[in-house]
Amino acid sequence: MSKPDDSDKAEDGGPSAIEQYLVKDPERFALNMARMVEQAGKAASAWAEPREKGEVRDHVAEPVVDMVKTFSKLSEYWLGDPQRALEAQTRLFAGYMTVWANAIQKVTPNAEAPDDAVQPERGDKRFQDPEWGRNAFFDFLKQAYLVTSRWASELVEHAEGLDEHTRHKASFYVKQVSNAIAPSNFILTNPELFRETMASNGENLVRGMKMLAEDIAAGRGDLKLRQADYTPFEIGKNIATTPGKVIGRSDVAEIIQYDPVTETVLKRPLLICPPWINKFYILDLNPQKSFIRWAIEQGHSVFVISWINPDERHGAKGWEAYIREGLQFGLDMVEKATGEKEVNAIGYCVGGTLLGAALALLAQEGDHRIKSATFFTTQVDFTYAGDLKVFVDEDQVAAVERSMNEKGYLDGTKMATAFNMLRSGDLIWPYVVNNYMRGKEPLPFDLLYWNSDSTRMAAANHSFYLRNCYLENNLSRGVMELAGRVVSLADITIPVYNLATKEDHIAPALSVFLGSQFFGGDVEYVMAGSGHIAGVVNPPAAKKYQYWTGGKPVGDFNAWLAAAHEHPGSWWTHWQHWIENQDNIHVPARKPGKRMKTLGDAPGTYVKVRV
């Protein structure tokens, strides 16, 4: 190739538009390609070895089959009528023709730059590099991709005759495929990756394949995608550091009592029931973000359930066991530690769903120790459940149960992958590109450390949850069976504080709102800004987001929201006022161990068990 003349030089005097995409040192580049292949071989070995030993069995076919079935139903609609199929194809072809015409106009000298055929959605960070618009090749790829993905989404949106579950799944799968095939994910179709690869003579790919091999080995044959640098964090050292003691331990839970920091405390202790799908220290990441530490500073005697990370021994532990050996055991420990028979309780996510079911059961059994209940992003009705519902129908639940029955639990990586897929554009592909193509280590981030600290699901527990909540919606219908009883949320007559978050993709605000109507007492419904985690973990000092309060959560959700009052900042202070309005009697502060023997320092041992 002839040497580019001065007209090819970049305006800033740097490499020309052509030079930046050429190999700088062919010999070194070839050597690095060989090293990359060597590391790729190690990655393949890390994947294959556990399978050859029978330690890992792939169940990839089951979700792929479900996706194919879903797309087949979508295809039936569009291909069932030749006119309809022609119209769909014409729309796509027209989009491509616009992209092609734009591309020709952009390379035509002195021609006016045309508007793009389609623009990326707001907040889409994949196409920020200037070359996506300046370089005709990459601009063409971007626009063709956006036109195609937008067209595919519209096929789902406009398909008639699909039941809502199939439509939901089709939309989800289209989004997953669209995210996966984006040109930003590949070396030769991403200008930034292409330039970095040429500039480093492929050393980024060597580092990336080395990280891929390490992550597959860390996942014992499955890819355990690293989303942060985890090495700076250690539970109990610089994360989950609020001082306290373990005061009780059962087969499924440790009960932690935290040290007070005020001279007096509310007479009613506070018992927190977190989800077992994640670890409790999302509420105690660090002193600045810790809801637990903040609640202590407000004068609460705080107790937290720390769930076991289950293994084969816990396969038969169902919801009744988690109520008896977790929540009710926690109430017993609170009473033993404080002498109090009246307690305020908090449930977060599925921990809140368990709390709701337990309250309905305990009401029938005459256990009335919980006097107020607070639910963080909790669903008790699953009619409008979030994107996790995509994974739940009879075929998929049966497949999960077959997988769980082999070991007695569901691997933590399976749940972690499912949660990451809900936001694959934020939690999967940016890290695939950064780690394995750019070869860059992700930065330390405590929230993503917690997100990676996955937990297993005990088989009986998870099966009960999937079937009774997502699949059959038995709790809100009043037909859930627990401990030989049929429980009803209408039996819960204590005051309820029901917190939703506006952008929640797991427990949508609408779902939480509709669930409020099933309780038998007064419900204070509050909607916070942001999502499932950031909307909950929002300390007042941060002065972020907002929250909405209004009348009773009845009628139309949009009408409630339109009439609601918006308040700046954190909902935490609003909740504190609500709690104090229930009972504001104070007593001298209670120190762990004063009335009973302790079993070790917080955060305990169960939380430190990693998958």
Image (cartoon, rainbow, N blue to C red):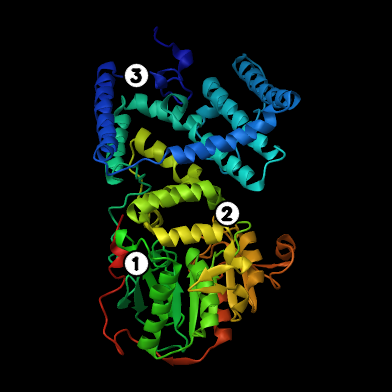
Residue shown at the point (40%, 7%) measured from the top left = 2
- Mark-to-mark CA distance, 2 and 1: 29 Å
Amino acid carrying label 3: it is Val
- The residue singled out by tag 1 in the image is 240
What is the x, y in percent for residue 532?
A: 52, 59
Between 59 and 198, the one lying in front of the other is: 59
User: In this view of the protein, can residue 514 be seen by the observer?
Assistant: yes
At mark 1, the secondary structure is loop
Q: From the viewer's perspective, tell me whether residue 26 is left or right of residue 99.
A: left
Residue at the limit of the structure toward the top, as seen here: 2
Quadrant assignment, res 579? bottom right
Q: Are marks 2 and 1 in contact (CB under 8 Å)?
A: no
Residue shown at the point (70%, 27%) measured from the top left = 88
- Mark-to-mark CA distance, 3 and 1: 48 Å
- The residue singled out by tag 3 in the image is 23
Location of the N terminus (image quadrant):
top left
Instruction: Decide which of tag 3 and tag 2 comes sooner along the chain.
Output: 3
Label 3 neighbour load within 10 Å: few <14, some 14-19, many 20+: some
Residue shown at the point (29%, 32%) measured from the top left = 44
Between 103 and 347, the one lying in front of the other is: 347
Q: In the picture shown, does residue 316 fall above or below 142?
A: below
- Mark-to-mark CA distance, 3 and 2: 47 Å
What is the x, y in percent for residue 54?
A: 27, 41
Amino acid carrying label 1: it is Ala
Instruction: Decide which of tag 2 and tag 1 comes sooner along the chain.
Output: 1
Amino acid carrying label 2: it is Gly
Q: Residue 291 bears which disc, if any?
A: none
Q: Are marks 3 and 2 in contact (CB under 8 Å)?
A: no
At mark 3, the secondary structure is loop
- The residue singled out by tag 2 in the image is 386
What is the x, y in percent for residue 50?
A: 26, 40
Q: In the picture shown, does residue 298 fall above or below 409?
A: below
